[in-house]
Image (cartoon, helix red, strand yellow):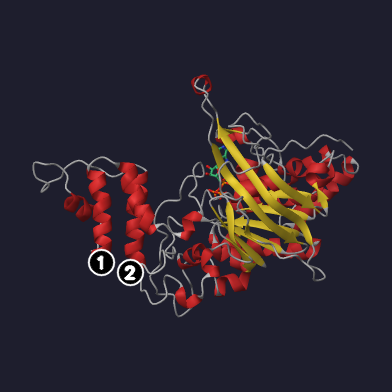
Amino acid sequence: MSSERPIRGDERTGDDRGGTEHPGDERYGGVPVGEVPDDEPAPTGPTPATADEPGESPLVRVRNLQKYFYEDDTLYDRLLGQEPTAIRAVDGVSFDVREGETLGLVGESGCGKSTTGETLLRLQEPTGGTVEFDGQDLENLDDLTPFRRRAQVIFQDPFSSLDPRMTIGASVRQALDVHGVGTPDERRERVAELLERVGLSADQFDRYPHEFSGGQRQRVGIARALALDPDFLVLDEPTSALDVSVQAQVLNLLEELQDEFDLTYLFISHDLGVIRHICDRIAVMYLGEIVEIAPADELFENPQHPYTEALLESVPRASTAEADRELETLSGDVPSPRNPPSGCRFRTRCPKVIPPDDLPLSQNQYRAVMDVRARIEDHEVSLEPVEGDGDEGVSVAGLRDRLFEEALPPAEAERVDAALSELVDGEWEAAAATLRERYESVCERRHPDGERAACHLQQVPADEHPSAGDSGE
Ligand SMILES: Nc1ncnc2c1ncn2[C@@H]1O[C@H](COP(=O)(O)OP(=O)(O)OP(=O)(O)O)[C@@H](O)[C@H]1O
């Protein structure tokens, strides 16, 4: 058997996407890689419950997994001694994948799902944290070959993951060749069996990928992933590129194969409809962190994290009394993983951000003040005079009208005006500090933890939630 790692056409490396990895490199600010380079405690997120029931032992145990990318630093940067900024794609995630289950990993585009899957499979080197597979820490293995046989991946786009110059039979057989499994005849027979099992025909062995439809190509991808009889599959958006009717067929096939071959799945998708259909438990990711993890039904029926709620709100519901409701869309942009918000990363978009005690503002008013403060901190408020400002340039009242749609109660309007007055004088930091002093939220000060959801609201009695009794209008 070869000890060489199989070369796979479908593997993406850090370089493919423009970034550079610097695992274990301490020249970046002297911050040992794997530590959080600021004063905040390392994020932890929801604590995975220890599995103590029979049949619920974890096959994969991930703890505080981190993957940072570093943009290429130029010679000029180095001459100036500038430190490259880390892109914190995965920033301390912990979860178990229990034997025989399907764990879903869901979240908006760019939140770190694929990087989590690739890093736990060691297709990318982690920056920090541990991954145990079947009780063994991958870090301690001299040879990853046995792990690579047992843990496979299926990507979204079967066309780009299949070599166009290779017959599909040769593609499926490749892993058997690399790992030296069986005689050539036995390998051919195994490939024929696999093609039949995934709904293709053994006669199609010598055909090329372009002769197949998208759904058929994904079946080839599945046959290839199964060739070495693995225990664990990372399915990275396996049906996202397919038509809806074909999606259902491929999902059904994956479910049948799971039962037949005792497979454990990590199912990555941004599509909550698909996730609900196929997953036993679901982990919700936001900006490099897991914010909630729960059994699928519980998560859908009673989401605990405002981000999970917002994601669910944005999904159309068929055949329920709510089918006609207006879909809520998540407001605001996802912040950059180069500079994630302090405390709870969702707070800049959260509709339930916790105000200081006794603040007489509705959630919408509070959000408006918080947004203005963020814009001041980022120097993103225009101080150019506009029509009606008169000869003296921009005025406090003019600025207030521009920045706030809704009037604030008098005492708060006074505080805001004091800050705007500093802003008009060009004192950006002072203006931000004036607002911070009065309006800072616990959500920005402290990173949240929790058994199931990493949200400070879990520590606040339900009737005192900021949204309680507030229509948000
Ligand atoms: N090689 C790389 N170099 C630099 N940044 C990267 C690299 N790979 C991923 N990223 C960044 O890391 C973050 C997480 O990306 P990732 O692809 O894991 O997210 P995702 O949730 O899988 O999104 P999608 O569903 O769009 O694939 C993004 O901001 C992405 O731009």
Name the foreground residue: 123 vs 283.
Answer: 283
Question: What residue lies at 51% left-to-right and 41% top-to-bottom?
Answer: 338
Question: What residue lies at 39% left-to-right and 77% top-to-bottom?
Answer: 469
Q: Quadrant of residue 70?
A: top right
Q: Residue 409 carries which label?
A: 1
| Callout count | 2
The answer to whether residue 106 is left or right of residue 60 is left
Q: Which amino acid does label 1 sit on?
A: Pro
Q: Residue 360 carries which label?
A: 2
The reply to whether discs 1 and 2 touch (Cβ–Cβ < 8 Å) is yes
> In the rendered view, would you say 377 is above or below 469?
above
Mark 2: which secondary structure?
Answer: loop
The answer to whether residue 417 is left or right of residue 297 is left
Question: What residue lies at 26% left-to-right and 45% top-to-bottom?
Answer: 423
Q: Quadrant of residue 371?
A: bottom left
Name the foreground residue: 230 vs 184.
Answer: 230
The answer to whether residue 85 is visible is yes
Instruction: Pick the quarter of the image with the C terminus.
Output: bottom left
Q: Where is residue 447 in the image (x, y as percent from the top left)?
A: 55, 56
